[in-house]
Image: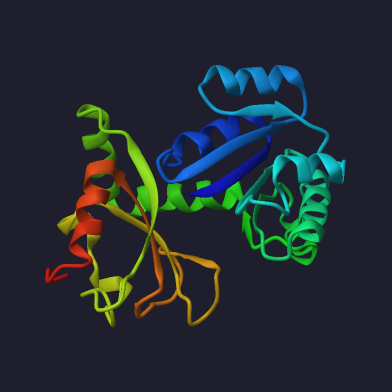
Amino acid sequence: MKKIAVFGDPRMALEALSKFDKETCSMIYAAQNRHDAELIAERGFAAEAIDFRDDSALHALGIGVDVDYLFCFFVADSDNVFLTISARALDKSLNIIATVDDPDSSDKLLAAGANKIIDPYEISGRKTYEMLTKPEITHILDQSVHRRHALNIAEIEIPENSWLENCKTSTLRLNERHNLILLGVVDKEIGDQLHFAVGDKEHVLNAGDVLVVMGPAREIKAFKETLIGDDDV
């Protein structure tokens, strides 16, 4: 079971915590104050107030012990940088994901040891662009609203011998065949960076690459099941 620690803005933290699978993930929210800890705890998630500037408090939480993923959701980039530096010093192999408010801070976070940077403004902008330029996305969103299907975002790793191997991202047409939206792909030949489906170059998929998709949970599950079968694209 993967252990995930989330720091920072409680609203963003709650959104992230609600998306993780409780059967495969152990989650804890590290709040800056008791009020935020109680707020998250009331929603059914483990939470405690700690001083993120205290290395002993981070270690007691599990960083450098058994935490696998750390999410830094502070409003201030400086706080995300500080936490990233501290956490990386405690665990060289920890997966650190951090948000950034000022794009100029991205390089600082990467230098501090973050594995992935999330720019909420860029993501919102790209999603808005997709909605304006791709009518099928509006169709999927409308279906979800009217049928009350909650939209989920999932990372799907392509297994060995999947029919997706050697496929081009432009040929997938997941919206037509699986009622899903392709948000982006992590092309392992290039690195661990997420390349968005809109505006980025063509990618030829291989085993180990990761598709980031959005859609109803049952559609995501059904699509995952096809990856180990003999289905055609």
Nearer to the camera, 153 or 65: 65
The x, y position of residue 170, in whole percent, is 29, 72
- Residue at point 42% right, 62% down? 184
Compared with 113, 151 (above or below) is above
> Is 139 on the left or on the right of 39, as rendered?
left
Nearer to the camera, 71 or 28: 28
- Residue at point 79% right, 66% down? 111
- Residue at point 27% right, 41% down? 216
Asked if residue 174 shows in the view, the reply is yes
> Is 104 on the left or on the right of 11, as rendered?
right
State which quadrant residue 39 falls in.
top right
- Residue at point 46% right, 41% down? 20
Across the whole image, how many numbered discs are drawn on residues? 0
Asked if residue 179 shows in the view, the reply is no
Q: Residue furthest right?
A: 54
> Is 182 on the left or on the right of 231, as rendered?
right
State which quadrant residue 206 falls in.
bottom left
